[in-house]
Amino acid sequence: MDKDILLTVKEPNSPPAYGSDEGANGEDLAQSVEALENSVRPVVLSVQNVTKSFTLYNSGMHRFWHWMGLPVKPREIVHITKDVSFDVRKGEAIALIGQNGAGKSTLLKLITGTMRPTKGRIDHAHSISAILELGLGFNSEFTGRENVRLSGGMLGHSPSELEALMPDIEAFAEIGEFFDKPLRTYSSGMQARLAFALATATQPDILIVDEVLSVGDAYFQHKSFARIREFRDNGCTIILVTHALPDVRELCDRVLLIDKGVVLRDGPPDEVIDYYNVLITEKQNAILTLEQRRNKNGWSVTRSGDFRAVVNDIRMFSAPSGKEIATARVGEKVLLKTEVNILDEVPQLVLGLMIRDRTGHVVWGTNTWFTRQAETDISAGENLTYTLEFECNLGPGSYSVSPALVSSDTHLENNYEWTDNLFVFDVINADKDYFIGTTMLDAEFTVSRGKAE
C-alpha cells in the first residue's frame, strides 16, 4: 500500500479554518519585536551545507585499493546528513527532533568535532560542552573521584580547577560514600549522576545534550533538567536532542525537524512538533495541513487526518448563564461544545479532547473510548454534538483545546482529524484566594498553636 504522506502547506495569507481570528495587531507587534531582538544577537554556531557520507565497498581489499589510489567503484554511498544549514544565536535554546536514524546524533558529533563533514563547514568561536554519552571514558576500576580527575582533564579542566569543583560535583551527584568506591560497584543510575555532574560542573558558552535527560531516576531527571534550564536562563546556548517532546516545548525557543539527513522544518516548537507528530503516524494517504498563522492568542494551529469526519465548531459556554464565553473564571462551571460533521461513512467514532497550558504542557485530556461512549455505524451526512461539562479549576492564564476524531483509543489506526490548538480560552481569578500554578486545589490551611515542650 502507498504510505506516502501528502503534505499541504497553507500560505500565511490563506483563510483560516473554522472562521478563527487572524493574529491581532498587538500580538503581531509583540512577535515582530521578539524577532528583532533575536536577530541582533550574535551567531555563535554556523552550520553551512554540511553533508556526512560513508562509502561502502564490497570487501576490505577494495577499500584498501581505494586508499592506495586505485580506481575502485564503491558498492554504495550512504548520506547521513545532506546539505544541512542553520545558524544558532547566543542564548538560544534549540532542539533537534526526528525518528531514530534521522541523523541527529551524527550532526551533533560533527558540531563537536568528533567527526569531520564530507562537505560543508561548521564555524564557532566559543567553548562547547557536549553530553553525548554519559560515562564515556570512565574507568570501571577507578573511584568516582578518580574518574572526575581523569575525565575532567579530558574535558579541558586543569587539576587545580577540578579540585575546586570537586565538592560541587560530589554534592550534585548525591551518591554518598560511593564517590570514593570503584565505578564497577555503581548502578547505571549512579554512573549517570556522576557523569552529568561532571559534564555540567561549569557553564559553557554552548551546551549540547544528546538523549541524556531520560537516564537515572525521576528525581535526578528533574534535577538535571533544572540545571539545564538554569544554564539557559543565564544566557547559555543550548542544543538538545531528545524524544521527550514536553521537554522541548518547555525548554526550547526553536525546533529543527531532521528526517533522512535533511532539515524538514525549522520553526517554533508547537508548529514543528505538531508537524512531526503527524509524520510519525505514516498513515495511508494521510493529509497534513500546516497553517502558517497564529490565532489571536498566538497559538499555532495544525490539522491532520483523512477528514472523513471533521470538527465543524467548538465553543465554550458558562453553565449557570448559558452565555458563550471566551474567558472563564477560576472555579466556574463551563460547557465545552464540539460539533462534528460526518463526510464519509465511519465504522466507529471517538472524540478526544486535550487541554494544554501556554508552555505546551498537557494539563488534562481524555476521549470517549475511555469513557465508554464510542459511537458506531455512522453514516455520511450525520452531525454529532458533544458537550463536556466541568469546573474550570485551572490557574489564571491562556489554554488551548485540541480535539481529535479517531476510531479507537489512539490516532494510530484511523485519524479522521486532529487539530492542535483549535480553540483557545483564557482563565482569570476573579473571586478566589491568590494562588500560582495551572491547577486550583480545593485546599484549606489549618493552624494549631501551642507551647514548645
Image: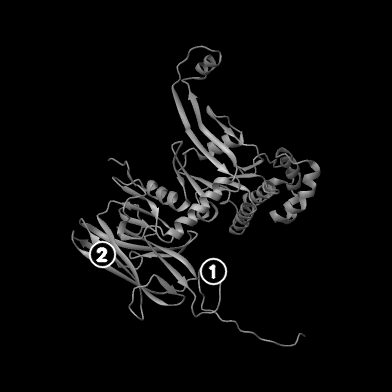
SS of the residue under disc 1: loop
Q: Quadrant of residue 300?
A: bottom left
Q: What is the image's colouring?
A: one colour
Label 1 crowd bin: few (<14), some (14–19), many (20+), radius 10 Å? few
Mark toward the start of the polypeptide (2 vs 1)? 2
Q: Gap between marks 2 and 1, in whole Å?
A: 36 Å
Q: Note whether 303 is above or below 139 in the view shown.
A: below
Most foreground residue, 328 or 246: 328
Image quadrant where one finds the N terminus:
top left
**Which mark's residue is nearer the viewer, 2 or 1?**
1
- Under mark 2, the amino acid is Glu
Furthest residue in direction bottom, as rendered: 450
Image quadrant where one finds the C terminus:
bottom right
SS of the residue under disc 2: strand
Q: Is residue 175 visible?
A: no
Q: Quadrant of residue 385?
A: bottom left
Most foreground residue, 3 or 421: 421
Image point (77%, 53%), residue name? 167
Q: Position of residue 436 (x, y in %)?
A: 56, 71
* Residue assigned mark 1: 437
> Left or right: 438 with respect to 400?
right
* Residue assigned mark 2: 375
As drawn, the label of residue 160 is: none
> Left or right: 439 with respect to 295?
right
Most foreground residue, 441 or 312: 312
> Left or right: 319 with respect to 217?
left
